[in-house]
Image (cartoon, rainbow, N blue to C red):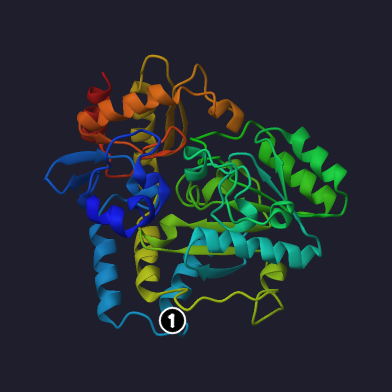
């Protein structure tokens, strides 16, 4: 769009939208309903972008739309605590028992940044361990060897990040406990926390190998560090209680976003009461936000979570499994956890970011455009997850598989 290019850096307000990884002009989307989106020329696409994760119920879910409408008509934001915040927090706490206290914020970036601040305050330590290819938002200290959009643009970090800030972040290899143990051992009593996507979903979908997450729990306990699960993507998507329920590992702190806002801007961090009570005004860790807990966002999140019954998860799992089993493309393999999947152009699903980066990105770009021509909109990067919703019913999956052949 010529006008957008004149107004925004690169013509976009988030880098992956520029289609630099696949080439060509991104479609201009004007409407969504269920599993479909329409461009400004009226063409319909099956949508596996799903706003990059929030829309587990599909576009324009009637209950969510009605909840948004009612909350907006009630006056919008008031700058005080409202009943919607309380109800959504109770829903989250019920489904994620590790979250004894929670703080709503406005983005996943803000939530991850704040959780690390709590970890440093609780431990009196400065260093953080993250994983190569893990993306936890664009806070300075977390843009070291990041995935997602940063991987797409081949940016090893970011200009504008001070070396002294980057030096506070140590980088381990996902699914490699020895790499974590080596960092903890070489920096004794210095690591405040290990932050991890329990299912890596910003290097494409990379599942944890057996024992990896429990191993992180054991290593952090031994080192006196905290374990932070970034469940911005996996929270309420891979299981009713997120990846921590699916894999049976309890973190000290959890970062949330996406689904808990029903498609509106949101983030949250929560965990053990003793840790969260360090946050102002209860404690000395300052964090604030004018629009945090916005009534319209809370209403959308509550309306979404209220619909996520076991039957809904069973339906989504069934359809995602059909898509996985039918997605047979020459030179590619499929990695899937629940309703998250990625078609990697390599022989076997990767176990870490180094292996993911060995994928044939040129082959993916060609595949992306062939699917777009066939009416299927995929995330425009080899290193992004596809998002299946309950609206992707049998007919939608059948149409997708037909486009693949």
Residue drawn 33% across and 79% down? 76
Q: Position of residue 227 (x, y in %)?
A: 70, 52
Viewer-nearest residue: 374 or 103: 374
- Viewer can see residue 69: yes
Residue 318, percent from left and from top? 36, 34
Nearer the observer, 138 or 269? 138
Q: Say which quadrant the C terminus sits in.
A: top left
Left or right of 53, for residue 141: right
How busy is the neighbourhood of tag 1: few (under 14 within 10 Å), some, or many (20 plus)? some
Q: Residue at x 40, y 70 (%)?
A: 298
The correct choice, above or below, for 322 with respect to 214 in the image is above
Which is more toward the observer, 242 or 144? Answer: 144
Place of residue 215 in the rendered image (x, y in percent of width and height, measured from the top left): 73, 39
Q: Quadrant of residue 134?
A: top right
Up-down relation of residue 351 to residue 270 (above or below):
above
Choose between 162 and 265: the one closer to the eye: 162
Q: Is residue 229 above or below residue 262?
A: above
Q: Is residue 245 left or right of residue 264?
A: right
Task: Name the element at disc 1.
Answer: loop
The residue indicated by pointer 1 is 82
Q: Going by the picture, which residue comes out furthest to the top?
A: 330
- Tell me where residue 293 appears, x and y as whole percent: 45, 73
Image position of 253 (left or right of 27): right
Circle count: 1
Does residue 56 appear anywhere in the picture? no
Query: Residue at image x 51%, y 41%?
Result: 202
Toward the left, the furthest residue is: 42
| Residue pictured at 76% horizontal, 35% vertical | 179
């Amino acid at each position: 769009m010529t006008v957008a290019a004149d107004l925004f850096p690169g013509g976009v307000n988030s880098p992956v939208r520029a289609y630099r990884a696949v080439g060509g002009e991104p479609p201009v989307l004007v409407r969504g309903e269920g599993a479909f989106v329409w461009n400004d020329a009226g063409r319909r696409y099956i949508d596996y972008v799903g706003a990059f994760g929030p829309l587990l119920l599909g576009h324009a879910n009637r209950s969510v739309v009605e909840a948004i409408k009612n909350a907006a008509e009630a006056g919008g934001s008031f700058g005080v605590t409202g009943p919607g915040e309380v109800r959504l927090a109770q829903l989250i706490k019920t489904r994620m028992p590790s979250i004894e206290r929670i703080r709503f914020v406005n983005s996943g970036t803000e939530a991850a940044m704040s959780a690390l601040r709590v970890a440093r305050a609780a431990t009196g330590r400065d260093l953080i361990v993250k994983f190569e290819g893990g993306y936890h938002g664009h806070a300075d200290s977390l843009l070291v060897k990041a995935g997602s959009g940063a991987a797409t643009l081949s940016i090893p970090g970011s200009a504008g990040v001070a070396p002294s800030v980057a030096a506070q972040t140590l980088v381990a290899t996902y699914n490699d406990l020895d790499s974590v143990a080596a960092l903890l051992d070489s920096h004794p009593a210095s690591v405040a926390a290990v932050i991890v996507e329990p299912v890596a979903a910003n290097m494409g979908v990379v599942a944890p190998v057996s024992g990896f997450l429990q191993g992180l729990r054991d290593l952090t306990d031994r080192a006196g560090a905290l374990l932070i699960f970034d469940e911005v993507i996996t929270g309420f998507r891979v299981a009713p209680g997120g990846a921590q329920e699916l894999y049976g590992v309890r973190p000290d702190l959890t970062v949330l976003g996406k689904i808990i806002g029903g498609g509106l801007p949101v983030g949250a961090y929560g965990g053990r009461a003793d840790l969260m009570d360090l946050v102002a005004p209860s404690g000395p860790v300052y964090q604030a936000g004018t629009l945090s807990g916005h009534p319209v966002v809370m209403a959308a999140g509550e309306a979404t979570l209220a619909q996520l019954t076991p039957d809904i998860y069973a339906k989504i799992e069934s359809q995602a499994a059909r898509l996985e089993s039918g997605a047979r493309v020459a030179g590619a393999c499929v990695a899937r956890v629940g309703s998250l999947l990625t078609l990697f152009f390599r022989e076997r699903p990767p176990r870490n970011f180094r292996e993911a980066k060995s994928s044939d990105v040129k082959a993916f770009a060609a595949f992306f455009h062939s699917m777009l021509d066939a009416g299927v909109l995929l995330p425009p990067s080899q290193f992004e997850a596809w998002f299946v919703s309950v609206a992707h019913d049998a007919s939608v999956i059948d149409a997708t598989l037909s486009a693949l052949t």
